[in-house]
Amino acid sequence: GNSVTQMEGPVTLSEEAFLTINCTYTATGYPSLFWYVQYPGEGLQLLLKATKADDKGSNKGFEATYRKETTSFHLEKGSVQVSDSAVYFCALTRNSGNTPLVFGKGTRLSVIA
Amino acid sequence: GAVVSQHPSWVICKSGTSVKIECRSLDFQATTMFWYRQFPKQSLMLMATSNEGSKATYEQGVEKDKFLINHASLTLSTLTVTSAHPEDSSFYICSAIELRELHEQYFGPGTRLTVT
């Protein structure tokens, strides 16, 4: 079946540090890949997505590239801010529409000033 | 962008009572909505898929008689937790797929249920 594995947290970084959160997936066919962010006390928000191999999703300084050869979708940001402190979820869904998301376990990021 | 609301945002109820949670797509039509459950510091687990005008499809291990789902219109799905117990305390989140964007789900803000 489909599954998502992402690095265990929590991750604690100083402001302006480089961030990488690893995410690998197992899926049949060609899934769409997503990163969602959940700020404290709030619901999930879509951060970025990629729907086919070699696509790069980007938003708010975050980037992730769909790597089919390594079945990965690692999240990166060059310089984190305190306001980036949140839980980040990697997820996938099949490209056949009307299918639910399969989530990774989430990685909690804390950025300290 | 598309907005999904949930009501209530939090609720406290006594054991044995039932609680209804509403999920609405505010500015789009959704033939499919999903209900997820999130335990503290854990990921979201799919509970069921709600399709407008038909019976919900439940994931393995989810009791359909306990978690009643109704999707009576293209903008509203409800989850009723019947005879709630403390172990049902959790964060319940719905999402909706817009008809024209089949690969993107919009999430509600979630409902925190506490059963005492």
Image (cartoon, coloured by chain):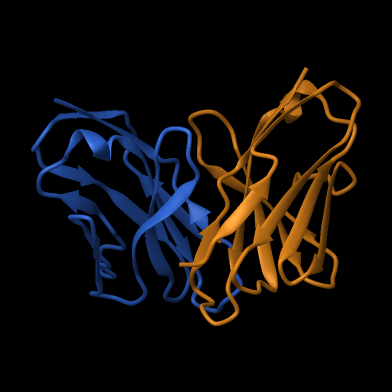
Which residue sits at x=29%, y=59%?
A72
Q: Is residue A68 placed above or below B21 in the rendered structure?
A: below
Q: Does any portion of residue B104 appear in the rendered image?
A: yes
Q: Colour of chain B?
A: orange
Which residue sits at x=74%, y=50%?
B22
Q: Does any portion of residue A1 appear in the rendered image?
A: no
Q: Is residue A5 placed above or below A71 in the rendered structure?
A: above
Q: Quadrant of residue A48?
A: bottom left
Which residue sits at x=25%, y=37%?
A83
Q: Quadrant of the C terminus of chain A?
A: top left
Report whether B115 appears left or right of A67: right
Q: Position of residue B14 (x, y in %)?
A: 84, 21
Q: Quadrant of residue B116?
A: top right
Q: Position of residue A88 (x, y in %)?
A: 36, 44
Q: How many marks?
A: 0
Please identify the residue farthest to the bottom as the structure is shown: B100
Which residue sits at x=25%, y=74%?
A55
Q: Colour of chain A?
A: blue
Q: Is residue B103 placed above or below B33 in the rendered structure?
A: below
Report whether B63 appears left or right of A38: right
Q: Position of residue A85 (x, y in %)?
A: 29, 35
Q: Position of residue A8 (x, y in %)?
A: 34, 34
Q: Nearer the viewer, residue A4 or B71?
A: B71
Report whether B6 appears left or right of B40: right
Please identify the residue farthest to the top as the structure is shown: B116
Q: Quadrant of the N terminus of chain A?
A: bottom right
